[in-house]
Amino acid sequence: MKRRRIADRGVRVLFSVNAVLAAAVLLGILIFLLAYGIRAFIPAGAVDPEDPSTQPLTLGGFLFGASWNPDAYGQPEYGIVPLLLGSLITTVLALLIAIPMGIAGAVFIAERLRGGVRVAVKMAVELFAGFPSVVIGFFGLLVLGPALARVFNVPSGLNVLNASVLLALMSLPTIISVSDDALRVVPHSYREAAYALGASPWTTAIRVILPAARSGILAAVMLGFGRAVGETMAVLMVAGNAPIIPRSLFDPVRTITTTIAIELGESAFNSIHFFALFALGFILFLIALFTNLIAEALIRREKRSFTL
Amino acid sequence: MEKGRIEIQQLNLWFGTNHVLRDISLSIPARSVTAIMGPSGCGKSTLLRCINRMNDLISDTRITGRILIDGRDIFSPETDVIELRKRVGMVFQKPNPFPKSIFENIAFGIRIHRLAHGRELKERVERALRQANLWEEVKDRLHDNAFSLSGGQQQRLCLARCLAVEPEIILLDEPASALDPHSTARLEELIIQLKNEYTIVIVTHNMQQAARVSDYCAFVMLGELVEFNRTEKVFTNPNDRRTEDFLGGKFG
């Protein structure tokens, strides 16, 4: 009796310590990002009026500036608009490709495949989800890039389109796998009801099963979004990386993540540039936070209207 | 031949090596209620699900024999299962409305078979709900989720959903087993109302229910048809000793 109580308490302590630890580490990263990022905006140490690179940034200039050029001789610029747009454009385009394909693939796997084939296909998809992004970047650099350049007759295949296609490829497995799980838990009684009314398997999948799995599929899309917006290496290799606002699919583009990866190593420690990159990281965090909150709210609304 | 008549001839069914239905022959008359009763696990639901070929969904099923509806064999390769299931509606043991609004639940079948749209669709939905005695209860909340209805209402909604595609035959698979006595009584009333227009086959292990609603009664045991006759006959003067024992409550 006593031993059981001790064991019980031990397990409880173990679990709570781990939970608190996990939360603390994440919170620590956030505080660290904020503490470093904010120093780009407050004058620290010696501000040399002659040297523009020591001037603190203004929040307005940072958020709304249309040019990112920290290395400019004379007047460095830290406007995140091109980077923010770069991240959003590539991610949105990637999702435009990956969402329809991913959902269609998931419906196929969940509704039409059975037994061993299903297991094999699902495993292959999940294996692809863990594919190193640098390898996918390699594919974009050596195969997709030249192909795009030839097909569309543009000077370089390292552009918005290439980055978006790679991001789509990388978020596809997540979207397929999570959507498939969501489709699988739709009660069998819905299928029976539809079949008994004379619905074909495809009609059933599209008009009954898919709507019933909506919230799970939304979660899949959000995970896909997270994968795309946070991806760095593959994009770095194929996006062309010019920090400009792209005007077509064939312009190079620079995302927030790649900017941090490219510039962190070459910025002077504790310089304005250095801190500005942390501020960029914080913006990335905000994007992830807001998309999650929106998804969360949508799912909750869905649940409210569809349970007893 | 009268429309809606079901002829079952020497029907055998196996799930894998399990011989579930044994040589069943049965002629179900049109525009009447036929009850299939028997102890649990005797194959009565499986027999019912042969009539709209719902057993197709189960892999490793083998069927011999024939089921003729209006003289046509439903297992023949020419039979369009979709068309068959449109003519043979089904209500399940547990109410299973779609996670959609009340209106959309009824409109679903009408839409997929392209029977009507616009105003006519609305009229058909109303007609189906009236037929199922549900209209008065839901007419002001057609766009509420179907799950907001009570169990009995959900089951009548499922019946209305099935009526909306205008079947000739309605299969009821223990439709009242998840309902309280009051809802059950309402559903039984409804079944009796509907029998003038439809051929109704109801599976039940509740013999009082079979006695109350049915004109004909089949007693199935261990996959075999023991007895089939007019309900009064089966209940007052059964031919087979096993039927008598079942009705007498010796097993169930």
Image (spheres, rainbow, N blue to C red):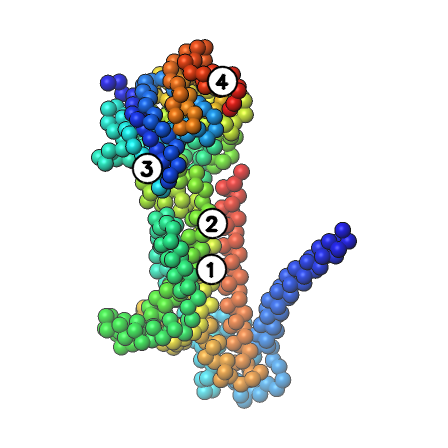
**Do the residues at discs 4 and 3 belong to one chain?**
yes
In the rendered image, which residue does mark 4 sit on? B245
The local crowd at label 2, few if under 14, some if 14 to 19, many if 20 or more residues have their Cα within 10 Å, is: many
Residue drawn at (33%, 68%), measured in percent from left and top? A161
Residue drawn at (52%, 27%), measured in percent from left and top? B179
Q: Amino acid at mark 2?
A: Ser
Task: Name the chain under label 3.
Answer: B
Task: Name the chain under label 1.
Answer: A
Q: Nearer the viewer, mark 2 or mark 3?
A: 3
In the rendered image, which residue does mark 1 sit on? A223
**Do the residues at discs 2 and 3 belong to one chain?**
no
In the rendered image, which residue does mark 3 sit on? B62
| Element type at mark 3 | strand
Q: Position of residue B159 (x, y in %)?
A: 41, 27
Alpha-carbon span between mark 4 and mark 3: 32 Å
Between B122 and B68, the one lying in front of the other is: B68
Q: Amino acid at mark 4?
A: Asp
